[in-house]
Amino acid sequence: MVGNYKVITLCGSTKFKDEFLREQKRLTLEGNIVISVGLFGHSGDNEVWENMTEGELTKTKIMLDDMHKRKIDMADEIFVINKHGYIGESTRSEIDYAIKTGKKVNYMENI
């Protein structure tokens, strides 16, 4: 908690940009501090990857994955964007990390 506000990190596939934005707004209006992704690599931020070499791409993806784990460290809990029940490998890794570090895990859709 920061002050009276719970801190929630959003996790999920960045192909669900609309759902990320909707849930971010909803959770914020419910009185939470919401931490989200920095870019939507699977739905609209293609310019980020356009001129990268394979090595730069790999290095950037590793950095972004690690950075999201640090966002989980800052949170009281995570909220998983799992549209149609979809949880990819990266999101599964974030859920496992959150559980391992004692964070509460909530889901957009029941699993």
Image (spheres, grey):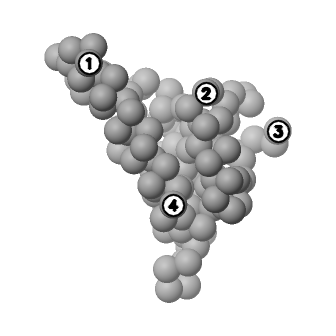
Q: Say which residue label 3 marks.
A: 111
- 6 left or right of 62 in image: right
Q: What element carries label 4?
A: helix
Q: Nearer the viewer, residue 24 or 76?
A: 76
Q: Residues within 10 Å of mark 2 (few under 14, many from 20)?
A: few
Cα distance between the residues tagged 1 and 2 = 21 Å
Q: Which residue is drawn at 24% across and 23% down?
A: 56
Q: Earlier in the sequence, mark 2 or mark 3?
A: 2
Question: Could you say where residue 63 lies in the image, as x and y percent from the top left?
Answer: 35, 38
Residue with the most extreme left position: 51
Q: In which quarter of the image is the N terminus?
A: bottom right
Q: Say which residue label 1 marks.
A: 55
The tag on residue 89 is 2
Q: What element carries label 1?
A: helix
Is the C-beta separation of discs 1 and 3 under 8 Å? Answer: no
Q: Which of marks 4 and 2 is nearer the N terminus?
A: 4
Q: Which residue is drawn at 48% across and 32% down?
A: 14
